[in-house]
Amino acid sequence: MAELCQKWDVLAFTDEIYEHILYDGVKHVALATLPGMEDRTVTINGLSKTYSVTGWRVGYILASPELTGAIRKVHDFLTVGAPAPLQRAGVAAMQLPPQYYEDLASLYAQKRELILQTLDDIGIPYFTPQGAYYVWADISRFGYPSDVEFTHHLIKEIGVAVVPGSSFFSDPKSGHSYIRFCFSK
């Protein structure tokens, strides 16, 4: 990715909100830390996932001064700013010791193993996630005409809510064989 950005002289915008929720020894590497990417990367992150405050909607960017100037101008038209108490709480959260992040990853690893074992037990094939707290599953063998119909079945008959795979595709038909489970709760 870094080589392509440099070759074509383009900026990279990265969403690194799941940087601390990784599994199986996977390590996060921020694109901006790679040689030649310092001034051509806009790193986007937030507090919602790592600190379990999804309703706060407090985020931040890291970029070169030239890029942040333009971003601040756009930001002024979209929102004035996050509430001051939430910003202070974010500063406190970001000062938590490394053990917090280790415990967070361990907690989600346990939850991941529970859902993967459950999916194995009931025979739903999936792609094992290396990060975040979602499992992408293949429902094609169940014979439903669409992911939405399968989703309705899961909600009404089983009491499990999932996201239809079609919602992730520009052509919804491409996602009719998939659903996404969330295991954060």
Image: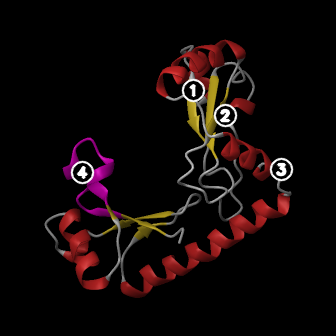
Dot 1 and dot 3 residues touching (CB under 8 Å) = no
From the viewer's side, name the closer residue of 51 and 151: 51
Task: Report which residue position mark 2 lands on.
Answer: 31
The answer to whether 140 is drawn above or below residue 21 in the figure is below
Between discs 1 and 2, the one toward the N terminus: 1
- Quarter of the picture containing the N terminus is top right
Dot 4 and dot 3 residues touching (CB under 8 Å) = no
- Mark 1 closeness class: few <14, some 14–19, many ≥20 residues within 10 Å: some
From the viewer's side, name the closer residue of 110 and 79: 79
Disc number at residue 174? 4
Q: Secondary structure at mark 1?
A: strand
Q: Looking at the image, which residue is at 54% across and 24% down?
A: 75
CA gap, disc 1 to disc 2? Answer: 8 Å
Disc number at residue 95? 3
Find out whether residue 171 is within the magenta segment: yes
Q: Nearer the viewer, mark 2 or mark 3?
A: 3
Task: Report which residue position mark 1 lands on.
Answer: 12
Give the magenta range. 164-179
Dot 1 and dot 2 residues touching (CB under 8 Å) = yes
Between discs 2 and 4, the one toward the N terminus: 2
Between discs 2 and 3, the one toward the N terminus: 2
The answer to whether 101 is drawn above or below residue 94 in the figure is below
